Image (tube, rainbow, N blue to C red):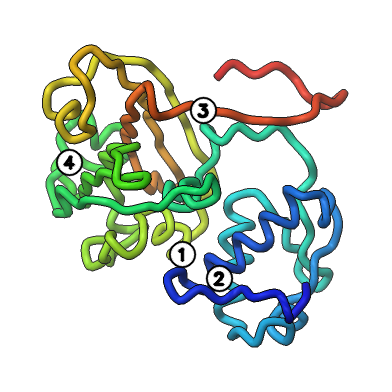
Amino acid sequence: MNRKTPIYNTMTPLFKQIKKYIIQRIHSGEWPHESRIPSENQIVKQFGISRSTINRALRELTVEGYLVRIQGVGTFVAPRKPRFTLLEIRSIADEIVLRGGKHSCDVHLLAEEKAPLTLSIDMDLPENSPVFHSVIVHRNNKQPLQLADRYVNPEMAPDYLKQDFTRTTPSEYLFHVGPLTEAEHTIEAIAPDDITRNLLEMPKNEPCLVIHRRTWSNNIVATKATLFHPGSRFRPSGRFKPSSSTYPTNI
């Protein structure tokens, strides 16, 4: 890292700038897969940023699969493996910014509710247990890109309802409060209902690509989310190099 290279942007939190810097070095090949990256102390000295900021950036990149941290040894770029952006747990805001856009959002709902039977089964909770519910439209350059209808287990994120999700995203907050150790995705194309169509500002005959996602933190079902995307504005993609250890995957 070159200290003369400016990294500070007053509009973007420092930990996000560090994350972006590291991801760019990985994608460019400057930091190859399985190589050791500079230590926390080196990054702190290089940029004059607090250790807690660096630690948060490295912790989130580890949860997101970019890095591997080995206690007493160091932090390494994760081994190369098939990566499909669609199947990664990544903040929609980071995804938009990394693709050159500007993220904003509208929070339509943020409330505590009682879990009906079907939801309680999906989240492994007793029926009528309290759950946190958010409905947020994420925008790319002011155009709706994703409607995120998300339920959160209060045990995982007790302060979820206190967050200002116009300043951070639910994914960013959840990465911060605890590790997401497992994810399950189901993908389908649908004709959206009128409410979804209006929130996403979609033309009448356009289909939606929908991702149904559950995440776990160790043995706890942390979230259950339904993510709606206008078909013309969302294209899942991934790039990887096949190897002898790569097997076909149905997605």
Q: Which residue is mark 1?
A: 176
How much space separates mark 3 and mark 4, taking CA atoms? 31 Å
In terms of depth relative to the viewer, which is nearer, 206 or 115?
Answer: 206
Q: Mark 3 or 4, which is nearer the eye?
A: 3
Amino acid type, mark 3: Pro
Dot placed on the residue nearer the N-terminal end, 2 or 1:
2
Which quadrant of the rendered structure holds the N terminus? bottom right
Q: Position of residue 182 (x, y in %)?
A: 53, 42
Residue depicted at x 43% and y 46%: 92
Residue type of the residue flagged with mark 2: Arg
- Counting residues from the N terminus, which is met first, the one under dot 3 or under dot 1? 1
Which residue is the site of mark 2?
A: 56
Depth check: 245 or 28 in front? 28
What's the residue type where badge 1 is placed?
His
Q: Does label 2 or label 4 sit earlier along the sequence? A: 2
For image coordinates 37% across by 29% down, the residue present is 212
Relative placement, left or right, of 200 versus 87 is left
